[in-house]
Image (cartoon, grey):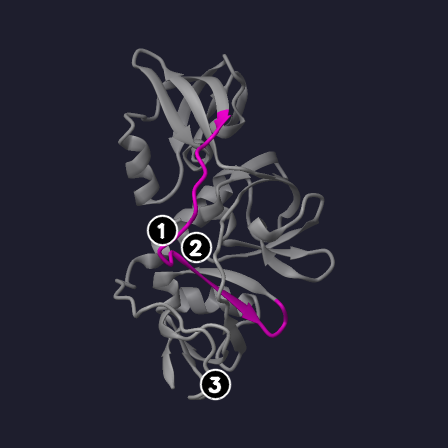
Amino acid sequence: MEASLAQAPCETPLTLTRIVGRQLEAQLGRMGIYPGSCITRLDEEVALKTVRVRGPKGEVLLGGGMGGKVVAHLDDGRMVPLTELRPGETGHIEAVTGGVSLAETLAALGLVNDDRIEMLRVIPPMEYVAHVQGRGRIRLAEGMAAKILGRLGDMECQFANAQAGADFVVTRILGGERARRAIAALGLAVGDVLRLDHVAKAPSYRLSGGGRIVISSREGLRLFLRLDQADLVIVRWQAGETGAQGGAPQTTDTTSGDDRP
């Protein structure tokens, strides 16, 4: 049988037959996944984690949505998403499986392909409580705080790295259109002055609804794909060899999926 990866069964040997879209084909090819590759769609709940890593310009915080799309080539030869690294592991950025917006966001944070990185720690879901000058208090999830770039005195950094009680002047909102809209909905814009009050543990959550698909290659690479990306990967398998059944067929607009972070 042949179908998109989003419609393929889990825990069943799959042969990749084609990838629709040159950008995704190039991204996966860099990691050794191309037509003819044997892969498996994993039947597991994916809990994307926020991570703090050290890059060429210092410490950077990446929300799970970003970190899960950055593939690191570790010094021991393994290739895994940043969210799968253990504290202390080092390597370099091998590829980014998101679109242009994510690549631009990472570049603004000083992270590009082949940059050396070190995993510092995994961070539980947090919220940043801050005061907006002239408007009052707001609460930001760590993913939003990571996408707000600004100046703290003479230093440029993410709001996620801001010091409590110090004025933080917003200079840039990072991320794709969806992230920008979410931050704009809070009334935040370039030029605003924020002052971090405190950081608290956010209410626990679970990613549900099949928002991510995880695959593993024969070489041991484990990779997170969005549903719209999985729709672009066509696979085949032998009838009668299916394991756990994958999710129901998805109807997705694949023409603009690569532009989201």
The magenta stretch is 200-220
Position above or below: 34 against 205: below
Dot 2 and dot 1 residues touching (CB under 8 Å): yes
Residue at the disc numbered 1? 260
Left or right: where does residue 181 sit relative to residue 85? left
* Residue drawn at point x = 44 percent, y = 31 percent: 145
On the picture, is 203 further left or further right than 176? right
What's under tag 1, amino acid-wise?
Arg
**Residue 120's spot in the image, x, y percent?**
65, 39
SS class, disc 3: loop
Q: Marks 1 and 3: which is nearer the front?
A: 3
Query: Is residue 82 positioned above or below 149 on the image?
Result: below
Dot 1 crowding, Cα within 10 Å, few <14, some 14–19, many 20+: some
Left or right placement of residue 199 versus residue 189 in this view: right
Quarter location, residue 81? bottom right
Dot placed on the residue nearer the N-terminal end, 2 or 1: 2
Task: Indicate whether residue 228 is drawn in magenta.
Answer: no
- Measured from the top left, where is residue 40 in percent x and y? 51, 73
Q: Amino acid at mark 3?
A: Glu
Question: Which amino acid, by three-letter code, is at mark 2?
Answer: Gly
Q: Quadrant of the N terminus?
A: bottom left
Of tags 3 and 2, the one toward the viewer is: 3
Task: Please name whichever residue, 127 or 22, is drawn nearer the observer in this view of the structure.
Answer: 127
Furthest residue toward right = 76
Q: Which residue is mark 2?
A: 98
- Whichever of labels 1 and 3 marks the residue nearer the N terminus, that label is 3
As measured in the structure, the alpha-carbon distance from the residue carrying label 2 to the one carrying label 1 is 7 Å
- In this view, the residue in front, 116 or 194, is 194
Q: Which badge, 3 or 2, comes first in the chain's sequence?
A: 2
Tag 3 residue = 241
| Residue ID at (31%, 69%) | 248
Q: Are marks 1 and 3 in contact (CB under 8 Å)?
A: no
